[in-house]
Image (tube, grey):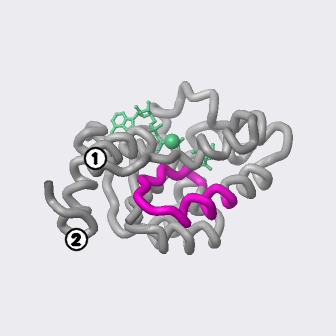
């Protein structure tokens, strides 16, 4: 079994994935890190040089690679749900957890992040979050089995909620 974490930028996927992996004795893999390693460039460098389509192509290739494995916590990039092929593969890989947060929370958490280039190139920082989040909402919803709102809770509390659900739903045994 794998555990898949999806959600917008700043909802805490990477932070929570580390904790869940430790708790369940699974291996955490970050799709963003795998893209960066594969390209030999940072995300801003990939997007600057080749554009978002090239980034999405790389992302799709790492989704294909890791969803064929077992025993992973798969920490997805925020836009992994943009491609239908990824939705199908992630759904087959294991239970999909959707982390959510409000626009102000997301803006606060990712405001200083230099590794997350603009997705639209046109909107203001906060308008982009609101617009892209609204557009993506049905796609996150369609792929996910369990949703956790991460506003006003710690990373540890989110990880606890995910592990409790995995036990309750029969995906892992209580320890
Ligand atoms: N529940 C939380 N409470 C407080 N801070 C949080 C919480 N979850 C995440 N953070 C902080 O928000 C920032 C972004 O979190 P993280 O990198 O895990 O997000 P992400 O979902 O992986 O985003 P991305 O899609 O951009 O990779 C980090 O500094 C993290 O410590
Ligand atoms: O929301 C998105 O589309 C992205 C989120 C990040 O995790 C990275 O995958 C990249 O910056 C794109
Ligand atoms: Mg992340």
- Is the CB of the residue bearing disc 2 within 8 angstroms of ligand 1? no
Decide whether residue 10 is among the magenta residues. no
Q: How packed is label 2: few (under 14 Cα within 10 Å), some, or many (20 or more)?
A: few
Can residue 113 be seen by looking at this rendering? yes
Residue 96 drawn above or below residue 112: below
Residue 166 is situated, as x and y percent measured from the top left of the image, at 25, 62
Q: Nearer the viewer, mark 1 or mark 2?
A: 2
* In this picture, residue 66 sits left or right of residue 155: right
Q: Which residue is mark 1?
A: 159
Q: Residue at x 26, y 46 (%)?
A: 23
Q: Secondary structure at mark 1?
A: helix
Toward the right, the furthest residue is 49
Q: Which numbered dot is residue 76?
A: none
Q: Which residue is mark 2?
A: 170
Question: Front-most of 108 and 56?
Answer: 56
Residue at (53%, 29%) from the top-left corner?
111
In which image quadrant can residue 105 be found? top left
Residue 108 lies left or right of residue 175; in this view the side is: right
Q: Which residues are magenta?
A: 60-79
- In terms of secondary structure, where does tag 2 sit? loop
Ligand 1 within 8 Å of the CB at mark 1: no
Residue 172: x, y in percent?
Answer: 24, 63
Q: Measuring 49% from the left and 36% from the top, which residue is drawn there?
A: 107
Crowding around mark 1 (Cα neighbors within 10 Å: few <14, some 14 to 19, many 20+) is: many
């Amino acid at each position: 079994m794998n555990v898949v974490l999806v959600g917008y930028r700043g909802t805490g996927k990477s932070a929570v994935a580390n904790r869940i992996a430790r708790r369940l004795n699974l291996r955490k893999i970050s799709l963003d890190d795998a893209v960066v390693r594969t390209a030999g460039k940072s995300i801003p460098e990939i997007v600057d040089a080749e554009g978002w389509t090239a980034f999405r192509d790389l992302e799709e290739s790492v989704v294909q690679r890791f969803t064929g494995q077992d025993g992973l916590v798969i920490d997805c990039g925020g836009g992994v749900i943009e491609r239908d092929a990824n939705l199908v593969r992630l759904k087959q890989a294991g239970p999909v957890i959707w982390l959510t947060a409000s626009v102000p929370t997301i803006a606060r958490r990712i405001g200083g992040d230099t590794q997350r280039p603009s997705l639209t190139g046109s909107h203001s920082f906060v308008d982009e979050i609101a617009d892209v989040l609204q557009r993506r909402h049905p796609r996150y919803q369609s792929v996910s089995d369990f949703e956790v709102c991460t506003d006003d809770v710690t990373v540890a509390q989110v990880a606890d909620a995910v592990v409790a659900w995995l036990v309750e739903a029969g995906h892992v045994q209580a320890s």
